[in-house]
Image (cartoon, helix red, strand yellow):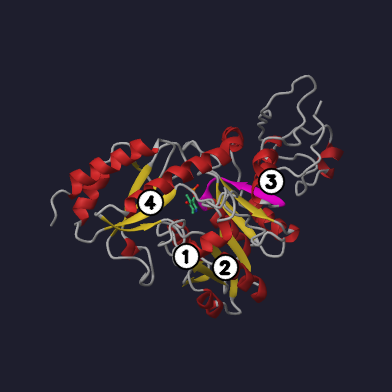
Amino acid sequence: MTHPAPDHPLAPATALIHHSYLPPEGFVAPQPAVHKASTVIFPNVAAMRARDWKDKSGYTYGLHGTPTTFMLEERLCALEGGLQCLLVPSGLAAIGSVSLALLQPGDEVLIPDNAYGPGKELARGELARFGVTHVYFDPLDPQDLTARITPATRLVWLEAPGSVTMEFPDLCAQARICRERGVISALDNTWGAGLAFAPFDLLGDGSLGVDISIHALTKYPSGGGDVLMGSVMTRDASLHMKLKLSHMRLGMGVGANDAEAVLRSLPSIGLRYRAHDAVARRLAVWLQDQPHIAQVLHPALRSSPGHAHWKALCGADQDGLGAAAGLFSVMIDPRYAQQQVDAFCDSLRLFKLGYSWGGPMSLVVPYDLASMRSRPSPHLRAGTLVRFSIGLETFEDLQADLTQAMARAFAAEV
Ligand SMILES: *Cc1c(COP(=O)(O)O)cnc(C)c1O
């Protein structure tokens, strides 16, 4: 009942839609069925004893996977270029499960100073409690990463760009350093989403990649602002097995309805990502010229820290425009007091106050930079940090909203 396989390699966007799913005889439909189970039913004791849950040749128990979760894992592998994938209940759970699977007392983990904040909290909390130390490194200085790797270093986290301040690191140099020093590299690839660059093939010739790519599926793969889920992807069978055994022992699993929601959204991820990107970039460029804004932090802007690294890694496609997510931050000019910045955020009508991103609704969060970084950030101008996540509204409507909120909040200069 399946169509013949195409005779040329498919682009990821196409491969996400045309997949090896075999529908029941007589029921061919665009979307796969949804399978739900706590356990599966075995025909006899011998079959039960013979079943090895560690391979994907069959089914054992809901936590070990269903046709629905296996399909989502396969499609995510098609998107990010991985070979094995584990689903977890959130993006943060992906960070936590990698840490718990790979680290033991006496080990050290290296974290970029601009990493996703709750991941740093995990290092300060559970990891410290379990005797795992952590050190922050400068994401813009590969030599700083090299200098901080010691015999105790077991895992290096990478993130491109960094959370909130959006510095784009030399990811190729970082991955190469980890490889040369024999340390496992784990990338938080939520921003890139498998669309801006290929985490397992950074140079495009198969010679360099990260060891692990984690993804908050909560963001672009879900796209709806209504699902929490994460993935842990690898291209190394033994590393995957280590992660999988720990994943099993911790009882990590995801609900079938949530897996279905992500499967429903995946085919449109390429279109949505480009739409978020296009409007975010126009707004970022426009905000650069607004008198209230001291700095716009968006890796596709020439003035943004690490722009050259973004261009080298993500700049090739879309007729040279390159790819970026719908996120950027601004430094509001320091002549405005915190309460004016708060009033600006409160005055926005289309932008809602909220933390996540990747859904249809634009969001805004004011941040306190000083509490987020372990060292000064000389590449950032003085001011008050505000992060925008651009949804799927039009440029003109969002621009008008920003204009009225700036006029209202920044009218009285102090
Ligand atoms: C949102 C996010 C996460 C965590 O995802 P949740 O599903 O909300 O736990 C991890 N990393 C980055 C970069 C994120 O933006």
Q: Residue 73 appears in which quarter of the rendering? A: top right
Which circle, 2 or 3, is nearer the viewer?
3
Residue highlighted by disc 3 = 78
**Magenta segment boundaries in residue numbering:** 83-92
Q: Give neighbour class at mark 4: few <14, some 14-19, many 20+ (Cα, 10 Å).
A: some
Q: CA distance from mark 2 to mark 4?
A: 33 Å
* Magenta highlight on residue 210: no
Asked whether residue 228 is in view, the answer is: no
Instruction: Check disc 4 and give the amino acid type.
Output: Val
Looking at numbered disc 1 in the image, what kind of residue is underneath it?
Answer: Gly
Between label 4 and label 1, give the one nearer the viewer. Answer: 4
Does 191 sit above or below residue 177? above
Residue appearing at x 62%, y 52% in the figure:
232
Residue appearing at x 73%, y 59% in the figure: 236
Of the numbered discs in the image, which one, if any, rests on residue 306?
Answer: 1
How many other residues sit within 10 Å of disc 3, few (<14), some (14-19) or many (≥20)? many
Sequence-wise first label, 2 or 3: 3
Q: Earlier in the sequence, mark 4 or mark 1?
A: 4
- Residue at 65% in and 56% down: 246
Which residue was labeled with disc 4?
A: 285
Q: Are marks 3 and 1 in contact (CB under 8 Å)?
A: no
Mark 1–mark 2 Cα distance, whole angstroms, equals 19 Å
Q: Earlier in the sequence, mark 4 or mark 3?
A: 3
Amino acid bearing label 3: Ala
Mark 4 vs ligand 1: CB below 8 Å = no
Which element type, helix, strand or loop, lies under badge 3?
helix
From the viewer's side, name the closer residue of 316 and 227.
Answer: 316
Q: Which residue is mark 2?
A: 156
Residue 149 at x, y = what percent? 57, 77
Q: CA distance from mark 3 to mark 1?
A: 28 Å
Task: Say what secondary structure mark 2 lies in.
Answer: strand
